[in-house]
Amino acid sequence: MSESLPTLDVQAIHWPSVIRHYRLSKGLKQAALAHDLGVTQTMVSRWESAAALPSARIQARLFDLYWVSQASVSRDVWLDRIGRHPAVVGVINPAGRIVRASRGFCRALDCDRHGLEGRYVHEAFEGDWLDLYDDLGSSGLFEGRVSSAESIDTVTFHAPDGTGRTRHVHGLHRPSFLPGPEIVWLLSGAEVSERVRDDVRMRLGGNRVIRKAI
Amino acid sequence: MADDDRSGRGEAEIWRNYLRRYRFTNNIKQAALAEDLGVTQAMVSRWESGAVTPATGMQARIRALAETSAGMASPLVGWRNHVSFQPGMAAVVTADGVIETASAGLIRELELSRGKVEGKSLDALFSGDLLGLHNILNAKGFFDGALESVESADMYCFASTYKNRDIGPVHGLHWPHVAEDGRVRWMLTGARISPTEFESLRRELGGQAELTGQG
């Protein structure tokens, strides 16, 4: 489960982006969001201009609102579902630690859950995902500045037994808003053939496309 | 610049990638980009095929457009869009068995175009296990919200229209999602597995499907 992970404070959540992104994506005016949160419109405006930081209680509520807009179940049910998911699905925290790996993820890499969970992307993999993690990070995924990304990657997995396996993975990425508050990287993907890898790379015009939130 | 053939192709390739990245980053259709630039969609399509390099004046306009839009807000990805972009097999299906949204991965696995999958009934496309699973879901109250999730091992097979061609064994996970209209949709996800994995999954699930309920 989500044992409290060491929170590296290097990538603080960028609250103006988080709030504006949520508000604009729901088509809300500042006054309407203020009403939902039980604060004044001036306060929302100050948060959005970075003149004030929302309180811990408001931060938690905003993350819950985000959560509801993306999922129809609680975070516990969601995490449990990811564990059983047949496709490649992973939850990666800001430090690059894989906190949850799906059954399909393990199957694609021919390992068990412990071959992935608790390990760091940089230590478990070699190849395009290292650049992807860096790119998502520098684009501000963990700060709430990215809305989604799509990528085509070739990665080599270092299994705990010392063997390696190389896979082409077509991936879809988005932030997920967990308590803490913490923004994690939700990776979902599928192993693809070399031909499909080339097709996707042609379509994307490169290895990845990152869509900024704000 | 483009006097020798090789550098000419290189330049067309750079513009092709530039245009596509710009469109995908900002979720813009070819027709909309064509309108912004005052050209035909066919022209955008030729640039993006890498067959033609935009003229110098047009290159400046494209750069200007891409630079102004950098930093603009892109909307939160809605759940339906998220499904349609999924690289794995996924779909949104109604209680009546109509496939409303299909993922990129499902379309790839079926080797059909999106138009041949979305809006179609399950029984128009498939035969066998998938139709059986739909019946199970209906019978067990899945569409009334009686189940939390369903895990399955299904042999995907095309309908007779497609000569009952086998697609292969798939490991599936399914859950209900309340859609915009307040009705439950079947969120279907899956991944291909080997025949050996299929056999052991069937044993593990005690049949085709294992239901996890709320009551």
Image (tube, coloured by chain):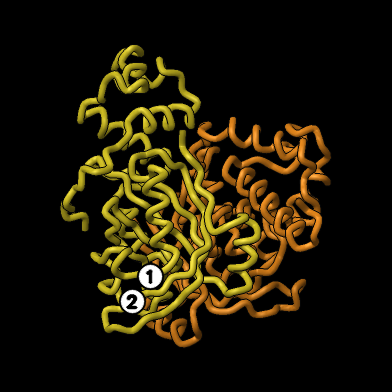
Amino acid type at circle 2 is His
- Find disc 2 in the rendering and name its residue: A158
Query: Is disc 2 placed on a helix, strand or loop?
Result: strand
> Which chain is drawn using orange?
B
Number of other residues with Cα within 10 Å of mark 2, as a class: few under 14, some 14 to 19, many 20 or more: some
Which residue is drawn at the image coordinates 37% and 33% (left, top)? A18
Residue B133: x %, y % from top left: 53, 67
Question: Observer-nearest residue: A186 or B152?
Answer: A186
Tell me, yes or no, whether dots 2 and 1 are on the same chain: yes
Q: Circles 2 and 1: CB distance less than 8 Å?
A: yes
Which residue is drawn at the image coordinates 68% and 73% (left, top)? B158
Question: Observer-nearest residue: B47 or A49?
Answer: B47
Q: Is A1 left, or right, of B212 in this rendering?
A: left
Amino acid type at circle 1 is Glu
> Which chain is drawn using yellow?
A
Task: Name the disc covering residue B52, or none.
Answer: none
Which residue is drawn at the image coordinates 49% and 60% (left, top)? A171
